[in-house]
Amino acid sequence: MIGLRHPGDRVTFSSKWITSLGVAGVTVQENVLSVDEILCSYNDLSPKLNTPSMNLSSVSFPPWFVEESFLEYKRWQSGRWLRSSTRGSGPCKVSSNGLDVDLDTSPLVCAAACASIGLPFALLPGDKVDVKRSAGRLLELQEEAVVLGAYQGRLWYRIISQKSEGGSLMEGGGRAWFWDESEAVEGGLELIGEGKGRSIELPKINRFKPSIGGLKIVYIGGAVGKLTISF
């Protein structure tokens, strides 16, 4: 659903999108049975509930649950991962059945995501960026975003400030999304301040190296040409 606020508002359809297969019914059933197995561990304590003699240390949890809990604790303790809703998530702020993602905030992974869109320097979580392009087009009013992390090789951000009147942040623009190479060209992403990874010079991958021949678009709004090949 797309909301338009003013006459002349434009919507750009691009190839930048994410999708999910959802949760299979068999997986949901297995999760329900697993939760039931955990809750059954409290049966022996039911007569002693709300009594001073109750001792939770005597509860015997399934080994798989103890192991998974410990791994989840170590994952949280590392401070590397950030769970965030995206523009594909549901409207509920408490829980979402949509496309929530676990973003990797490690510098190496974020630097690799920056190199994949042609940036010459690394943007790390917490860095603020002036966004001047969207889907390759120059924005009439630039936006300000904060870098969140990387997911599936892409650099994710969240819009935190707009100079326009309104609506995009209210309608989902303030949720996490990712940049592609069309938005990073020609200074489309400008770092605000020094940044945490500004001193890290990234190598240029082959597809961003200039090649001999080909076509170059020189007009801001793009151009349409006709190419004839004869044999």
Image: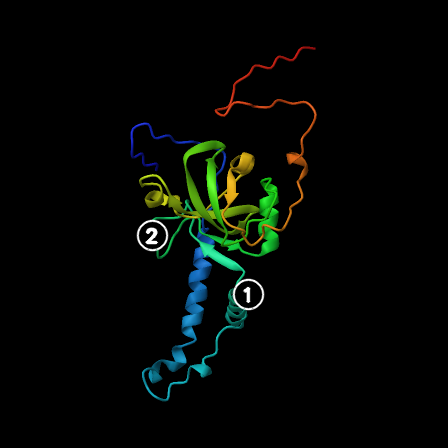
Question: Which residue position is annotated with label 1?
Answer: 78
Mark 2 falls on what kind of element?
Answer: loop
Q: In what element is the residue under mark 1?
A: helix
Q: Nearer the viewer, residue 129 or 69?
A: 129
Residue 18 horizontal/vertical position (percent)? 48, 42
Q: Given the image, on which type of amino acid does mark 2 rest?
A: Cys
- Farthest-out residue, front: 193
Q: Please say whether residue 19 is visible from this viewpoint.
A: no
Q: Quadrant of residue 211?
A: top right
Drawn side of residue 56 relative to residue 205, left or right: left
**Which residue lies at the image location 70% right of the left edge and 25% below the top edge?**
212
In the image, which is nearer the foreground, mark 1 or mark 2? 1
Three-letter amino acid code at the position of disc 1: Ser
Residue drawn at the location 48% of the way across and 57% of the way down:
82
Between marks 1 and 2, how big is the CA–CA gap? Answer: 28 Å
The residue most toward the top is 230
Is residue 57 visible to us here?
yes
Q: Mark 2 — residue? A: 92
Nearer to the camera, 221 or 15: 221
Q: Earlier in the sequence, mark 1 or mark 2?
A: 1
| On-image quarter of the C terminus | top right
Question: Which residue does the image show at 42% across and 51% down from the upper left?
Answer: 85
The residue nearer to you, when weighing 74 against 69, is 74
Please give the label number shown on residue 192. Answer: none
